[in-house]
Image (cartoon, rainbow, N blue to C red):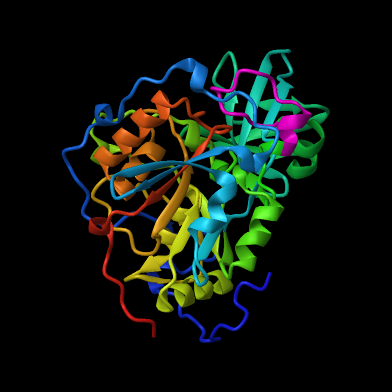
C-alpha cells in the first residue's frame, strides 16, 4: 500500500525472543517492572446507562473527539483529526476483520448450543466459547446449521471443535456479528457494515478495533495529503476482550493471548518515521499492543506471534507517542492501558469531563486522543 515508499530497504533482523516456531508460536509478555500496589477497584467509575451508545452515528467521522494533552482537555470533532498531525507523522492501524463469530446450534438430544468462535486454527478446526445447559465433554457432537462438529479438546474456557466443513464459509453463511454484551439489540445489516473498519482486511477478530470505526476513506486521504504515513498491523481481537478482570490485585491478572502480525514493511515504516522525528499515533489499544509487543529497546521488529502483553500503570512505552481510543468500561484492561499511557489522574479527569459533557461511550461511542506522558517512555536505541 506504499507505506514504505522512499524508505531505506535495510532488512531488520528479528530478535530470538520473538521468532516464530514451527508448531508453537511464542507468547509475548510484558517485561517491564509494573506497579504492584494497584487494585481493580482503582479503575471503577459510575456511568449513566444513557451514555452507552447503542447505534453508530450516521457519519463515522461526525463523532466527538476529546483531546487530552498535559492535563488540558479540548472538545473537538473527529473530522478535524488531520489538523492535529504533521507531515512525517505516522498513523498505525489494525486491519483485522471481524468475522460473524456467533453461531447457534444443537446437540443430538435437541439441547441448544451457542458458540462464539474465538479463533480459527485450521480451515476445519476452531477454538470456541460454548454456552450450553451442561458442560460439553470430549466427543460431543454439535450441529450448526447443517454442519456437524465434534468437541475434541479444551484449553481453559475454550473448547476445540472439529467441523465437517470449512469454518469461515459457515460463519459467513450462518454466523452473526458478535456485538458486545452492552449493546442490547440483535445484530442487523447496519451492524454488519458499521461494526467493521473501512480498512478491515484480514478476517479473524471477534470484536472490532473500535477506535478505527471513526475513520473514513476521505479522512485517510486527507491524512496522506498532509504527508502523514499510514502503516498497518494485524491483531485479531479475541473473546477475552469481553472477559472481566477477576483478580483484585492487577499484578495477579493473566492476559488472554491474541494473535498478531507486524510485517517487515510496517516495522520499517514505524522505525523510519521515529528516526526522522515523526510521532507515532496508534489508532486503538490493539494497534498499540501489537506494535509494543514487537518492539525491543525502542526498535520494532517483524513478528508473527501471540501476545499476552498486559499494560497497566508502570509500563514503559517504547514506540507509540499518541493514542486514539474510545471510552472504555470501568475495571477493564483497556481502561488500565489508557491510564498507563496518559496517567491515572488525567484519565480520571478526562472521563469525568466526558460524562459531564455527554460523550457517548464504548464501541459505537465517541473517541479520545491521548498524548503519552513523558515519564512512561522507554529509552530507544539508535537504528542499526
Magenta span contains residue 372: no
Does residue 339 appear left or right of residue 10 in this picture?
Answer: left
- Please give the name of the residue rendered at 64% of the width and 28% of the height, measured from the top-left corner: 115
Residue at position x 26%, y 69% from top? 379
In the image, residue 18 lies at what x, y percent? 43, 67
Residue 289 sits above or below residue 136 on the image? below
Residue 263, compared with residue 313, is above or below; it is below
Instruction: Point out residue 240 in the picture as x, y percentages from the top left corner.
Output: 48, 36
Q: Quadrant of residue 185?
A: top right
In the rendered image, the vertical position of residue 342 relative to residue 291, given as above or below: above
* Residue 245 visible within the image: no
* Span shown in magenta: 177-193
Q: Position of residue 355 (x, y in %)?
A: 41, 25
Most extreme residue toward the left, as rendered?
A: 37
The one nearer the camera, 313 or 235, is 313
Viewport quadrant of the C terminus: bottom left
In the rendered image, the vertical position of residue 384 relative to residue 131, given as above or below: below
Q: Is residue 24 left or right of residue 173?
A: left
Q: Depth check: 354 or 55 in front? A: 354
* Residue lying at 51% horizontally and 66% vertically, measured from the top left: 90
Q: Nearer the viewer, residue 136 or 208?
A: 208
Amino acid at each position: 500500500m506504499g507505506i514504505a515508499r522512499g524508505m531505506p530497504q535495510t532488512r531488520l533482523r528479528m530478535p530470538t525472543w520473538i521468532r516464530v516456531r514451527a508448531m508453537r508460536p511464542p507468547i509475548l509478555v510484558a517485561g517491564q517492572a509494573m506497579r504492584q500496589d494497584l487494585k481493580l477497584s482503582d479503575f471503577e467509575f459510575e456511568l449513566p446507562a444513557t451514555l452507552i451508545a447503542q447505534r453508530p452515528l450516521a457519519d463515522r467521522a461526525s463523532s466527538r473527539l476529546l483531546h487530552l494533552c498535559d492535563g488540558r482537555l479540548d472538545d473537538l470533532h473527529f473530522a478535524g483529526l488531520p489538523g492535529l498531525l504533521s507531515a512525517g507523522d505516522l498513523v498505525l492501524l489494525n486491519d483485522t476483520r471481524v468475522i460473524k463469530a456467533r453461531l447457534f446450534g444443537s446437540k443430538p438430544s435437541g439441547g441448544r448450543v451457542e458458540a462464539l468462535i474465538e479463533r480459527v486454527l485450521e480451515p476445519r478446526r476452531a477454538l470456541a466459547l460454548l454456552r450450553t445447559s451442561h458442560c460439553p465433554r470430549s466427543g460431543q457432537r454439535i450441529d450448526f446449521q447443517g454442519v456437524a462438529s465434534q468437541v475434541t479438546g479444551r484449553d481453559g474456557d475454550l473448547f476445540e471443535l472439529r467441523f465437517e466443513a470449512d469454518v469461515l464459509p459457515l460463519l459467513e453463511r450462518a454466523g452473526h456479528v458478535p456485538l458486545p454484551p452492552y449493546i442490547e439489540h440483535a445484530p442487523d445489516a447496519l451492524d454488519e457494515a458499521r461494526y467493521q473498519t473501512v480498512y478491515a482486511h484480514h478476517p479473524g477478530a471477534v470484536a472490532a478495533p473500535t477506535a478505527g470505526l471513526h475513520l473514513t476513506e476521505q479522512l485517510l486521504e486527507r491524512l496522506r495529503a498532509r504527508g502523514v504515513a499510514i502503516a498497518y498491523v494485524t491483531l485479531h481481537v479475541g473473546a477475552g476482550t469481553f472477559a472481566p478482570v477477576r483478580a483484585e490485585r492487577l499484578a495477579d491478572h493473566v492476559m488472554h493471548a491474541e494473535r498478531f502480525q507486524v510485517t517487515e514493511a510496517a516495522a520499517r515504516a514505524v522505525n523510519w518515521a521515529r528516526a526522522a522525528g515523526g510521532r507515532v499515533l496508534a489508532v486503538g489499544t490493539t494497534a498499540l499492543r501489537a506494535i509494543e509487543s514487537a518492539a525491543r529497546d525502542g526498535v520494532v521488529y517483524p513478528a508473527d506471534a501471540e501476545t499476552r502483553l498486559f499494560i497497566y500503570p508502570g509500563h514503559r512505552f517504547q514506540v507509540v507517542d499518541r493514542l486514539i481510543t474510545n471510552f472504555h468500561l470501568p475495571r477493564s484492561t483497556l481502561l488500565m492501558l489508557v491510564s498507563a499511557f496518559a496517567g491515572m489522574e488525567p484519565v480520571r479527569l478526562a472521563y469525568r469531563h466526558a460524562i459531564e459533557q455527554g460523550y457517548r461511550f464504548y464501541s459505537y461511542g465517541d473517541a479520545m486522543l491521548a498524548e503519552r506522558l513523558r515519564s512512561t517512555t522507554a529509552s530507544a536505541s539508535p537504528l542499526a
